[in-house]
Image (cartoon, grey):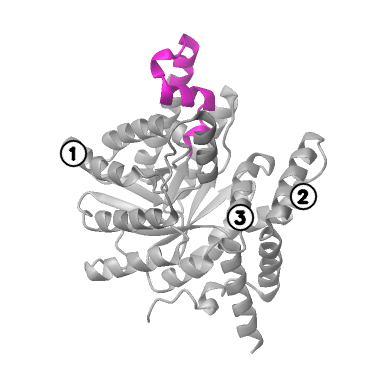
Amino acid sequence: MMLSFENTKIAFDSKTNKELQWAYRLFKLIGKPWLVKLGDFSQRIAFKLRLPVNGVIKKTIFRQFCGGETINECEKKISVLSEYKIGAILDYSVEGMENETELDLTRDEIISTISTAKTNDNIPFAVFKVTGICKTDVLEKVNDCPEELSESELEEWDRAKQRVHDICSSAKENDVPIFIDAEDSWFQDAIDIIAEEMMSKFNKKKPVIYTTIQIYRHDRLDYLISSLARAHQENYFLGIKLVRGAYMEKEEERALEKGYPSPIQKNKEATDRDFNAALKFMCENLDLIWFCAGTHNEYSSAYLVDLMDELNISKNDKRIYFSQLLGMSDHISFNLAHLGYNVVKYVPYGPVKKVMPYLLRRVQENSSAAGQSGRELTLILKERNRRKS
């Protein structure tokens, strides 16, 4: 059977007619940028005034893009995905916490996702963000001017590094590979350093720790190539999650505001070129690189399929995974899984209010009619028409 991302029967087989209609209405709404901006403003005001908006959010965008508020609440969506041979990644999507107690609790919750994954074959990976377990002002200072850290900031950074070590050590002990997500460029150098330290320590026999590379940055293909050289030199496996990236507008605005060169690629074509070049580079170095291609781009997904065929790499080779986010690009995830490729979906979860930054990024990502929401609507309409015929 040939790969086709137009096969909506496979893409939406898990959805009832009612669920399909509900998804159509949601993407129709978030395809209106003015409405997205109004909704963002309204929810911020509502939370400040302590209005009862949790229920509304949970029944709408939260329902589309999140698995639940707790690990147990995610079980239903994990089970549905598993029926279609798609794995899940429990993603505790709480970030930007500034209280030491909260940071410790986030670490503990991430370790709980690792423990859950150990006992559930349908959860092949775990994931975390360093901003979930480190104060952002400390992380930024470590990134830009570590020599200027005060004594208390050094202590905070030591505690943050210990949390990272605790999580990675748990992943190693439980034999659950874990992704360290990429973040804004003003945090990323510090994250790269600690991610490489963890890979060097825990990836001696196979990748347990995966770092994340955002290709919308013009320097990241070179970083990938140099990372492999360091892995060769220090004798460890390189785990990579490759993404285009999620913070582009923030990056460009901050670079303009602070007067430094933008780290972002000149255009989408350059990003696409480097993404596919990175896929080829990794496929040609599978002796030391295991990777996950996190992409909602149909061309890049098909390109990786072609690469695997060209290089005689098995569809279910455990060194290569495809990944998409829950609630998005089911036409990619379900069609790839149907053909036997390794596919995982991120299943974000957490208290509604605390995952709002994540949800707002997903809504904004879908708010262009020419972008994701437009494609989702076209496919949903196609499937609705198919079911009626």
Specify whether residue 350 is in view. Answer: yes
Q: For the view shown, which residue lies furthest in the left direction?
A: 233
Identity, as a three-letter code, of the amino acid under mark 2: Gly
Q: Is 104 or 195 nearer to us in this picture?
A: 195
Q: Residues within 10 Å of mark 2 (few under 14, many from 20)?
A: few
- Quote the CA–CA distance across marks 1 and 3: 39 Å
Mark 3 sits on what residue? 65
Left or right: residue 128 versus residue 327 is left
Mark 1 sits on what residue? 235
Q: Residue at (51%, 30%) from the top-left corner? A: 133
Left or right: residue 355 versus residue 316 is right
- Quote the CA–CA distance across marks 2 and 1: 51 Å
- Quote the CA–CA distance across marks 2 and 3: 15 Å
Where is residue 289? Give x, y as percent: 26, 50
Q: Is 116 or 5 nearer to us in this picture?
A: 5
Q: Vertical placement of 32 versus 145: above or below?
A: below
Q: Residues within 10 Å of mark 3 (few under 14, many from 20)?
A: many
| Pointer 1 with pointer 3, Cβ within 8 A | no
Identity, as a three-letter code, of the amino acid under mark 1: Asn
Give the label on residue 249, or none.
none
Mark 2 sits on what residue? 55
Q: Is 27 or 237 nearer to us in this picture?
A: 27
Q: Looking at the rendering, in which quadrant would you find the C terminus? A: bottom right
Where is residue 178? Give x, y as percent: 40, 44
Left or right: residue 261 versus residue 360 is left
Q: Which residues are magenta?
A: 129-157
Q: Is 338 or 368 nearer to us in this picture?
A: 368
The kind of secondary structure the magenta stretch mainly shows is helix
